[in-house]
Structures are given as structure tokens and as C-alpha cells.
Image (cartoon, rainbow, N blue to C red):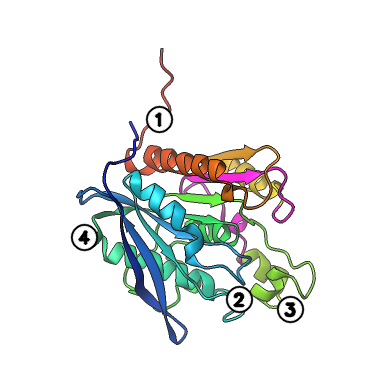
Amino acid sequence: MLSKLPGRVTIEDGVVFGTGGDRDLECDIFLPPDERADRTAILLVHGGGWFQGDRSQLRGYGIQLARYGFVCLTCEYRLSGEAKWPAQIHDVKAALRYLRANSERLGIDPAKICVSGNSAGAHLSLMMGATPNVQVFEGKGGNESVGTECAAVVAIYPPTLLRIGNPDDVIAALLGPKATREAEDAASPITYVHRAFPPTLLVHGNADDIVPVAASFEMYRALAEASAPVELHVYDGAPHAFDAVPDLGRQVTDIIALFVDRKVANPRPVAVPG
């Protein structure tokens, strides 16, 4: 049975995990209060429309999920004002490679690394699951000899199909205002749906006016039709970033913990008592 561990979470702040462009990229690492060598890890990717935000936004998730026994890493990545796509996915993949390359030191099973993100970070998390070891998305700045497969994906109010609405919107800032439809599709997670997609958890509010809940419904349907493992949790009346409300944030944390435990840490089917 999944439960929180007694003891304190150890936090390593400001760890350099790779380089992006000409600068270091930093992360914070959250270590559970146990000493096992085969723990499951969760890479946490912040949101902010790809143009703002930082890794501190997910510090609460890092601490709470570490209390469930998961090693967590919150990473930064180059924002769209600093570098255009696909720099962002390059940086997040460098963070995953760091986790895998340092699995022995961190007490991680290298085959049990998951990715979770919110909003723009949820888009990046789905792209991580969609494009393991795909050359154009790998980039440089970490240990390129290490694979970027992930065991599961959690996407909280994710953009799943990128379309530029006008030259000044956040997607234009990410892809460039003259991005073609082909470029938009190449940056959209829903393009890559297939049967072998990692187990995916989608979480969304049905009052979201920034990323409409239809984005998660469409991703859910596509994955389900491909026979990929997927589940969707919809919060009634919840807007974008609803998990900033403490009670809802704690519940989403519990949902993530149960999903990762059930699909990755201790894989098992849903068994109905009787």
C-alpha cells in the first residue's frame, strides 16, 4: 500500500545538470527519507507559456512526492525569449539524462524515470514520452550517450496541439511567427501517439480558459484509440493552474503518486475486491 515515509526529505539546490547554449542549467533534487537503491524518479517540468516561470514553482510537488518515496528533480530550461524551439526539449532531455547517468548516486532504478509537468511543462513532458532518443529533439549539453526513454508521463493541463493564433502569441514566441504547419505539428505531442506511448496521466480543469480541457480529451482519445495506457482526471469548475489551491494541489499529488506507483514503481492491474 502506498504511504508517506517518516523522516525528512533531503534537498540539493542549484545542481548543474548540463548546459543550454552557453550557460549552465540548474536543478533541485529531492531525496526521500529512505536508503533504497532502486527508487522511482520523477522529473518535474515547470510551466509559464514557455516564456516565463522557473523550477521553484514545483518545489511543493518535489517535497510531497519525495515523501512518497520518489526521487524528484525540478529542472530549468531555456525560455522562448532566450532560445527558440526545440531548445526547451533539449534542456529537459539533458535533465533526464542527468538522472539516468547519476542513478547509482541517487538510488534510482534507471528504467523507472518518469516525467511530470504543468501547462507548458506538461507539453514538454508529453514530448519527452513521445520522442525518446529522436535525434532532432536530443540536443547537446548533457551526457549524450545516455538514453532519454521515460517510464511514464504526467501532464497537468497540457497543450497537445500547437497552433499559432497570431504573431504575438506564446506559441509564435516559441516556434517563431513564421512557423509552418509542419513545424507546428512536429512540436505537438498528439502527432506522435502510438501504441508504445508510455503510460500517461492527464489532469485538467473544465473551466480552463488558457488551455481548454478539449486538449486533454483529444490526447486521451488518441492514446486510447492507439491502445496506449492512459487515464484522464477532470476537475469540475477548475481553471488553469487550479492545483495552486492547497487542497487541490495535495489531491493532484496523491493522484500522481498512486499513478506512478501503480504503473512504474510497483506495476499492477486494478483489482476489484470481491
- Of labels 1 and 2, the one closer to you: 2
Mark toward the start of the polypeptide (1 vs 2)? 2
The quadrant of the image that shows the C terminus is top left
Q: Is residue 19 left or right of residue 79?
A: left
Does the rendering let one see residue 227?
Answer: no
Q: Residue at x 41, y 54 (%)?
A: 62
- Of labels 1 and 4, the one closer to you: 4
- Look at the magenta stretch and give its main secondary structure: loop
* Element on which disc 2 rests: loop
Residue 128 against residue 4 in the figure, above or below: below
Image x and y of residue 10, in percent: 29, 57
Q: Residue at x 56, y 52 (%)?
A: 193
Q: Which residue is mark 4?
A: 104
Specify the amino acid type for callout 2.
Answer: Ser
- The crowding category of the residue bearing disc 2, from other C-alpha atoms within 10 Å (few below 14, some 14 to 19, many at least 20), is many
Mark toward the start of the polypeptide (2 vs 3)? 2
Q: Which residue is mark 3?
A: 178
Q: Which residue is mark 1?
A: 269
